[in-house]
Amino acid sequence: MQPSVKSKGPADAFGRPLLNLRISVTDRCNLRCRYCMPEEEYGWLPREELLSFEEISELAGIFTEVGIEKVRLTGGEPLLRKDLPVLVRMLAQNPRIRDLALTTNGVLLAGQAQALWDAGLHRLTVSLDTLRPDRFLVLTRRDAHAPVLRGIEAARQAGFRALKIDAVVVRGANEDELADLIEFGKRAGAEVRFIEYMDVGGATQWSRSKVVSRAEMLDALSRRYGRIEPVVEDCSAPAERFLLADGTVFGIIASTTTPFCRRCDRSRLTADGIWYLCLYAQKGTDLRKSLRSGATRDEIKSLIVSQWTKRTDRGAEERKDLPSRGVLVGIQQLRQDPHLEMHTRGG
């Protein structure tokens, strides 16, 4: 493996740089999407164990000193965290963070978009899997389609131009809306990215039969739009980008059928300070314990570097090669350890 992005920070065992950090600010969510949170009951992280904004900012600062340049705030649903623009402003003051982004389901975005922009957030990604309110209700089990659309419009009005819309494509649920979503993206001034259904922690209803592959998506879209050209880029972004004849660009994140582990430079920090080196990782490093026990910045930096340089994670590639591929983690194990849930460690 060779890294696709040069970095001044440490490289892991396969030469992948430490460059991209995703920070979950809460494990709570106001939707119950069937591909992410299909169960009725969940165990939540104790609130007293969640990192404060000051602790998040401190850890983010330490990470940037060892190479991190990109930070994305996630959840759960990050806009459920009270006063989130305060944290955004704190992070935006760090000159080493050249890309500060946030992923949201958009339900609460209309009321916070302007404050996020004013606080210094650079980019915004909104999850929207369907344009049909009835399907939205089935997929998310919440009647919140209209607020999401209002949130996307509010983001544009606030000033966000590098807006992205993420859609998880599930067979039998929304695979017939690919072109409709691209057309919506054109009207909304947003780049649409389609995501293959992933068998991550929490996806207890996953099966191969529900996965719509990148090849199938491109085939369906080419029947609608004609020739589709790949956009040649040298970057570590998870999405492969494609160009339509009219200049429209869209992306596909094909982590299930075509993993990008060989260029993955991202890791994840949970809301209670556990650092995971891979979305599929079963164990992480407790940075909250180090921080709250009085460890120095240099000691925490050494811990981060030592863990990263030993990193050999290739979770998606290893899953792809399994002869019999089922759910990653069973429901009983998830209930015993909520850190295994994707909504806890962020997408």
Image: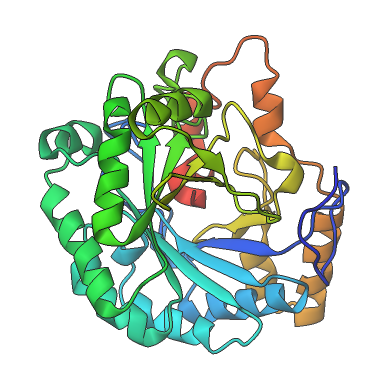
Query: Which residue lies at the image location 19% right of the left edge and 41% below the top edge?
Result: 131
> Would residue 21 be found to the left or right of residue 109 on screen?
right
Q: Residue at position x 15%, y 62% from top?
A: 150
Q: Quadrant of residue 125?
A: bottom left
Vertical comparison of 324 with 232: above or below: above
Residue 112 seen from this side: no
Q: Residue pushed farthest top? A: 324
- Which percent across, then down, holds residue 187? 24, 57
Residue 74 can be seen in this image: yes
Q: According to the image, what is the colour scheme of the structure?
A: rainbow
* Residue 107 in the figure: left or right of residue 343: left
Q: Quadrant of residue 168?
A: top left
Looking at the image, is 308 positioned above or below residue 295?
A: above
Count of numbered circles in the view: 0
The answer to whether 204 appears left or right of 38 in the picture is: right
Q: Residue at x 43, y 45 (%)?
A: 245
Find residue 228 and report its horizontal and vertical position in percent.
49, 37
Is residue 134 placed above or below 55 in the rendered structure?
above
